[in-house]
Image (cartoon, rainbow, N blue to C red):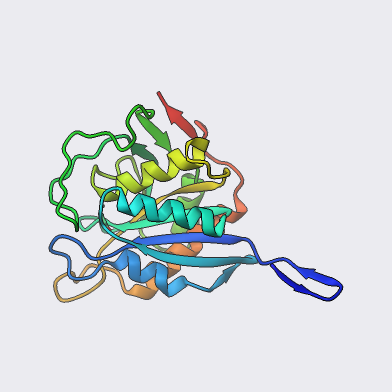
Amino acid sequence: MVTTPGHTLRAPPTVLLTGFDAFGTEPVNPSGLAVQALHGQQVLGHKLVAATLPTVFHRSLDMLKELLHTHRPVLVVCVGLAGGRQALSLERVALNVDDARIPDNAGAQPVDMPVVAGGPAAYFSSLPVKAMHAALQQHGLPVEVSNSAGTFVCNHVFYGLMHALAGQGGVSACRGGFVHVPHLQSDAHPTGWPLAKLAEGLRLAVQCALTTPTDLRLGAGALH
Ligand code: PCA
């Protein structure tokens, strides 16, 4: 908050966007690059704050929780790379399981471990995934609603985010969820997306979430 004599100017509400650093055999991670491209921009009077999380179980979530406490966002969209996918994937559900096919960036490879011991089996995203799907389609961007964010660090962060937002982590309630993005376009990935297209897709997704109060018939919350 900025204070001048006689006036109190409120800082704009914040939207937190996170991406990841490079992992496995990937030389770059488009999720980190795309959110950084949006850092500092405004959407409908909201300030976008971007951060890059390490692709490391638990450390990523610790950093995300710090960011939630620091920025007190009204909306959180975590973003990661899903190499095999050609569309923006709006993730509907986070599972309480870590089951890594490859080691994370710190060498850990948990198998059949809970993200949060004793936590609910799953959480729904509290983003309006159907409205976001329609909005992105209207702009001609390939998009899908996905029912699995996998069982690696992306699902781990998604589950930990929803658990924190459900009130278990001492963070005041706000909306949040996860979006997987395709590869960046390159010689190795000719069908990948240019960075500007990824950033535009995420910006439209944020805009839609800010203007759509609810759209999930099931509603957000824990799945027991
Ligand atoms: N994608 C991985 C982890 C980091 C990332 O960008 C995943 O889908 O779990």
Q: Is 109 in front, or is 77?
A: 109
Q: Is 61 in front, or is 203?
A: 61
**Could you tell whether 78 is left or right of 29 in the image?**
right
**Could you tell whether 61 is left or right of 166 in the image?**
left
Quadrant of the snapshot with the N terminus: bottom right
Report the residue at 61% width, 45% height from top: 213
Quadrant of the snapshot with the C terminus: top left
The picture places residue 143, in percent across and down from the top left corner, at: 37, 55
Quadrant of ligand 1: it is bottom left
Q: Is 162 in front, or is 208?
A: 162
Residue 159: quadrant of the picture: top left
**Residue farthest to the top?**
224
Residue 73 position (above or below residue 52): above
Residue 56: quadrant of the picture: bottom left
**Residue farthest to the right?**
6
Report the residue at 39% width, 62% height from top: 141
Total number of numbered discs in the rendering: 0
**Could you tell whether 133 is left or right of 173 in the image?**
left
Report the residue at 87% width, 73% height from top: 6
**Could you tell whether 77 is left or right of 110 in the image?**
right
One can see residue 125 in this view: no
Residue 156 position (above or below residue 197): above
The picture places residue 25, in percent across and down from the top left corner, at: 12, 63
The picture places residue 99, in percent across and down from the top left corner, at: 19, 40
The picture places residue 57, in percent across and down from the top left corner, at: 26, 49
One can see residue 75 in this view: yes
